[in-house]
Image (cartoon, rainbow, N blue to C red):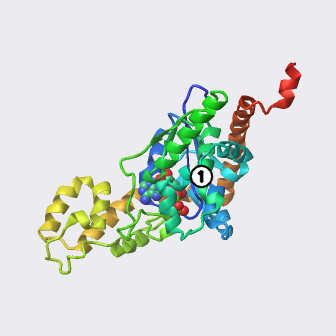
Amino acid sequence: MNEQRKRILTGDRPTGKLHLGHYLGSLQTRINLQYEYDSYILIADVQALTTHWENEEILAENVVNIAADYLSAGLDPEACTIVIQSMLPEIHELATYFALYTSVNVLRHNPTIKTEALQHNFTDMTYGFLGYPVSQAADISIFKAHLVPVGEDQIPHIELARKLIRRFNELYKPVLVEPQAITSSVTRLVGLDGKNKMSKSLNNCIYLADDRAAVLSKVKSAVTDPARIRKNDPGHPEVCTVFAYHKILNPGELAEITAECQQGNIGCVQCKNNLAGKINLLLEPMHERRNKYKNPDLILDIIAEGTKKARKVAQETMEEVRSAMSINYFDIYKRQ
Ligand code: ATP
Ligand code: MG
């Protein structure tokens, strides 16, 4: 490992396949930065269980799916390290130490926790769910990551991580690194429902693995301007989900689409066909790369190797952490 280079840590919950929101919000940044930083990509299976503890059977399939999504989207296994969270017990150890001085009220007031608790109908939040941002702070600091590429919903968690790390460094010794969040220009891609963020749990996604036909049929189902009934009715692009996607994926034609829609010169079907074409263009190279990773054994080897390498880094960090906290008793006695 090159000690000169700064580190990136980021990851996803294996609760389903990756979607366009992941790609535009975080994955694309990771791909762009992978040769510049030492990049650790965490498949957060324990965090997935904070909302899916009764559906543990989803993990095995999704761990491989997500890794396949990473590799086909363009993460290079030679450049970045793909890691399984549950296989690094050091993360859970560090999370326990962070939890010692984390305020429960601060967690309760975290806006992302509040939104997600509502989404999952959690009236009585579990200790594990309420505390997942603490575990996430440990994910980041076990690798001493400098940068964390994330979408908007993660910003409060990175803020908390920075506070916990700063506090640790003040309380004990300055061994941990305060991370910075890095967001892309798409901090929150809206889902096909036009209301919520595109999210694996909400069934409103275009997946990176979707084929051309699936993309077209999903785009056709997207919510558009409700005031447009006939093709010639003047449209209101600012309230249309399809237009929101054009804005990101089709900037070259934006002015024309805006004018044509407002004047009622193009219908929603034509506009949707155009968008589906643009999305398929983006996904095409991913589908080609995906063919290389058809064999799950190949993916499992990459994850196993990544996890092994990451474990060494985690063990090094924990030695420093324990020593900073003076819980390295044998070393202390040896020195006397
Ligand atoms: P779940 O519904 O299981 O929580 P999710 O779709 O929210 O899944 P996560 O695994 O929680 O996905 O998020 C992984 C990363 O992708 C985070 O950095 C998150 O901010 C980013 N992300 C997820 N959805 C979007 C989106 N719609 N737009 C931009 N970024 C997103
Ligand atoms: Mg999420």
Q: Quadrant of the C terminus?
A: top right
- On screen, residue 107 above or below 194: above
Q: Position of residue 7 (x, y in %)?
A: 56, 35
Q: Quadrant of the N terminus?
A: top right
Task: Work out whether residue 209 or residue 121 is closer to the camera in this orientation and state it.
Answer: 121
Determine if residue 215 is in view: yes
Q: Is residue 281 left or right of residue 164?
A: left
Farthest top residue? 336
Task: Work out whether residue 235 or residue 327 is closer to the camera in this orientation and state it.
Answer: 327
- On screen, residue 247 above or below 221: above
Q: Is the residue marked 1 within 8 Å of ligand 2, measured from its CB?
A: no
Q: Is residue 228 left or right of residue 62?
A: left
Residue type at the position of mark 1: Val
Quarter-wise, where is residue 16 in the image?
bottom right
Determine if residue 18 is in view: no
Q: Position of residue 274 (x, y in %)?
A: 28, 66
- On screen, residue 146 above or below 303: above
Q: Which residue is drawn at the image coordinates 76% and 30% (left, top)?
A: 326
Which residue is identified by label 1?
Answer: 104
Q: Which residue is drawn at the image coordinates 67% and 66% (left, top)?
A: 53
Q: Is residue 102 left or right of residue 200?
A: right
Q: Position of residue 102 (x, y in %)?
A: 61, 45
- On screen, residue 72 above or below 168: below
Instruction: Tell me the crowding category of disc 1: few under 14, some 14 to 19, or many 20 or more residues within 10 angstroms, Cα based.
Output: few
Q: Which residue is drawn at the image coordinates 57% and 50% (left, top)?
A: 133
**Label 1 residue SS:** helix
Quarter-wise, where is residue 47 in the image?
bottom right
